[in-house]
Amino acid sequence: MDNVLAENTKLDGLLYAKLICGGASNLRRHVQEINDLNVFPIPDGDTGDNMLLTMMGGVEAAKTASKNLYSTARKAADGMLLSARGNSGVILSQFFDGIASGLEGLEEADVFQVGNALREGVKHAYESVLEPTEGTILTVAKDATEYACSMLSEGSFDINKNFISEAKRSLKRTPQLLPVLEKAHVVDSGGAGLVAITEGMENILLGKEDSEIADAKDNSKQPVKIALDAFTEDSVLEFGYCTELLIRLQNAKTDIGAFDTKIITDYMHGIGNSIVCYKTGSIVKLHVHTMTPDKVLAFCQQFGEFLNIKIENMSLQHNSLENEEKEEDDFYHPEQVVEKEHKDFAVVAVANGNGIIQAFKDLGADEVINGGQSMNPSAEDFIEAFDRANADTIFVLPNNSNIILAARQAAQMYRNSDVRVIESKSIGCGYAAMSMFDAETCTDASEIAEQMTDAMQGVVNASVSICVRDTDMDGIELHSGDYVGFAGKKILSCGKNAELAACALVDSLDFEDHEICILIGGADASAEGISQVRSHIEAEHPGCEIYEIDGGQDIYNYVIVLE
């Protein structure tokens, strides 16, 4: 069957929604192989997961698609922006955000208009990165777009097919542009994800059935399981209703550009708690726990119309959890959140492992998002944490280089506070920055941010993890099953077990300008192992002050921080 998007056909909103769904479906099939295109030989590859979760935000948002192309493209882009996680996910969301901007005002588009929208997508993607790196998804998107658009002038109107053909060629060239890829003998994982997405779109354009898409739709229609006996005729509504809604602001009801969600949050404080409210374009998302959901709906409908509403009896959920053994995912488990008192300054950090999370809380972090390598939080996760933090100025510690873009994106989308991202690229840097956070003696936000940034200078963050493939890096021969010690992306040691690799890592680090060593044991580290590594540090560096944390983090058996 011929491609339906050609010279004499138009792209409308319904087809666009199918393309998003087809792209996500094909990406799902290739997630693991994209994850495995990991430059570093440890089990932390997550590009495929991040891109899929980002795409699924678009799929969910486009479920209410209309025939209007721009409306549907904007919904999908907004969903991706909120769901974006990881560098590749954020860049992908910005690519689709640019496409939506390029389609503004269009009910349908021909191939030339689609080409212009793709160019706008590339522009947005590049602008989302402070220092764009060639040889990544950016390059693949740019090369494919320019080729597909150039072919239009040559009389070839099969724009998606041309995009794919050049994207594949560009992907093969990525190791020539990025030495780290060539060194690891892989192509760029983000670029590979983009190829998978557009190939999935091509399946839709060619009229191929996609059973995964059909299954997803069928599953979404399954009735929600409700434990009816958990709330009887004599029960008392103790916990109220968890009320969530999406509302599309209407020009006839309000000034959308000037609309401030504070008018909603101020009202909700009078009738509920656990309030999370933010605006993306003309869409407002609200979460509130209240005894009177009818008042929530009536108030919000002054400003627009509902796209989605969910109201759940939290007393029913609470009683059911106490009295019955249920599967964990049978129904929503509301987190009983005590709303924080409003304050001038707050810190939102990202960490993985109960011990590390507690350490950040002990240092004064107001909110700690559970995440890190291989479990990057989304922009929406950050936005919800910002609301819970409830402060005029919020400092964000991503604590991972692959989380910084999502934190920045969330900060740009958030309107209720002044959000400042402190670009901590590791747990060690974040810990040092948090140690310098002092909102009592210093009341200037810029000065606090500067102090936190300065505290990260010179911090060494080294880790130990298992090697997942045979390779030769930095002059060290590695075998699958070995343990490797590294700082940044430089391999410094290896060993047959984690403790040997950690001790060898200690020997390779320069302790001379550092007075403090923080030894963090991971989920797989035993008390005996931690003791062995600590004893080695004490023996080799007797003047160093050692702090020990039972971190419980995944992936990294040990993290060694020098300050």
Image: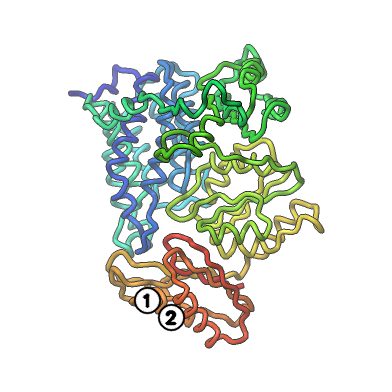
Q: Amino acid at mark 2?
A: Ala
Q: Amino acid at mark 1?
A: Cys
Residue depicted at x 54% and y 72%:
519
Residue 212: x and y in percent read 27, 32
Marks 2 and 1 sit apart, C-alpha to C-alpha, by 7 Å
Asked if residue 462 lies left or right of residue 166, the reply is right
Asked if residue 267 lies left or right of residue 548, the reply is right
Residue 218 image label: none
Residue depicted at x 51% and y 56%:
352
Vertical placement of residue 215 versus 146, above or below: above
Query: Which residue position is annotated with label 1?
Result: 494
Q: Nearer the viewer, residue 493 or 264?
A: 264
Residue count near mark 1 (Cα–Cα under 10 Å), binned few <14, some 14–19, many ≥20 = many
Q: Nearer the viewer, residue 266 or 159?
A: 266
Pointers 2 and 1 in contact (CB under 8 A)?
yes
SS at mark 2? helix
Residue lying at the far left of the rendered structure: 1
**The N terminus, quarter of image:** top left
